[in-house]
Image (cartoon, rainbow, N blue to C red):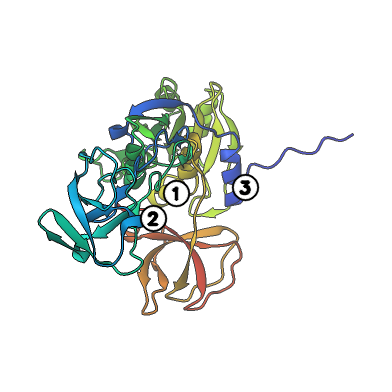
Amino acid sequence: MVDSPPPSLKNLTVEEARQRILADAFRLGAESVRLTESLGRCLAEPVVAGRAQPPFAASAMDGWAIRRADYAPGARFRIVGESAAGAAYPRPLGASEAVRIFTGAPLPADADLVIIQEEAVRDGDDVRCDAGKDPRANVRPAGGDFKPGDILLEAGVVIDPWRLSLIAAAGRAEVSVARRPRVAILATGDELVPPGATPRSDQIFESGSCSLAALIEAWGGEAVRLSAQGDDVEAIAAAVAPAAVDLVVTIGGASVGDHDLVKPALKTLGLTLSVETVALRPGKPTWSGRLADGRRVLGLPGNPASALVCAELFLRPLLAALVGAAPDIRLTPARLAIPLPAGGPREHWMRASLSTDADGRTVATPFPDQDSSLVGVFARADALLRRPVGAPAAATGDLVEVLPLRRG
């Protein structure tokens, strides 16, 4: 029997590369945090209601609580008390009795109808109610929002302000959330200097690690910026070796040539590759693997636009998987504002701006210059427009797929 050749690691499709990067990516662990510190974190276990909400039948309006069995248009009721939020009327309601009640207050026992104040007239110690033959109950039933044992939020959802409110309504002061992945960022290249330094005429400011650190924090990770390194195998390995992280993201040094030294440097730390190149524009040099100690590595191209495109396509879903969230890439349809030529042999992700036409449809306008070194274009873009491999020429108004960028 002849063994089949190992699968190629080069020129993978975007989806093949993503599947390999996510193949064994699972939630790293869990920790308990205070509810006030949980915004943006991913739930590690479901939130289950331990109490009904509301825990009592409550009035939906300001008015008068009575028994429906006593009601008839124009009927009079004796006022026996008041029920307000946090100060319930303490006794059951008797025949032809009424309690002044306010929105959110508990209904007295045996009351099942609230006549709104606009449909009642007080006369001394009595109130006359006239809400027609079949008035609305104006009652929020006990457990109308949720009941004990209800699963309010599933594990894997990210806590936003609305979900935080639901957790608080369930009385939870703490929640179990996924541990945030620690991600080291290493930019490489002799041409780089940090912002604020004085560059030589043949150097540029290093900008990739700043944006990636911000994205990692926004996507649920904890960014650790390593000092940028020049084109030196030993220096690169020495910078990565002690980093106590779950994932190392490198920028640059990932193509071909005498100065592309990241993979050789990390091979001294036991690097095993799972992705070597991707049939992607921009971003062909993207690669991925693991070090001998189990730390993951994602290598991004040095050009800022390439690095940011590949971060959206590979880093964001990987971080989602590492906190137990769905690692999906959600594309939305849009109409082309300008014609586009036929696609080439690589999947092309174009920076584009989005707008809305007179019919309320989303319109995508690709920027004319898609050079991967242009940071200014990315700063003005609010979406990536996907062009599949070998896509036919597209006319103005044709449908395309876009990945909206999260701004703010």
Q: Which residue does the image show at 34% across and 46% down from the upper left?
A: 110
Q: Is residue 90 above or below residue 73?
A: above
What amino acid is labelled 3 in the image? Glu
Task: Check contact, mark 1 vs mark 2: CB within 8 A.
Answer: yes
Distance between the Cα atoms at labels 1 and 3?
A: 16 Å
Rendered image quadrant of residue 272? top right
Residue 268 coordinates in the image, percent (x, y):
53, 23
Residue flagged by tag 2: what amino acid is it?
Leu
User: Amino acid under label 1?
Assistant: Glu
In the rendered structure, which disc, 2 or 3, sits on the residue that comes first in sequence? 3
Disc ID at residue 244: none
The residue pinned by badge 1 equals 312
Residue at the far left: name it: 124
Residue tagged by mark 2? 405
N-term-proximal mark, 1 vs 2: 1
- Helix, strand or loop status at disc 1: helix
Circle 3 residue: 16
Determine whether the residue tagged by mark 2 lies in a helix, strand or loop.
loop
Closer-to-camera residue (392/98)? 98
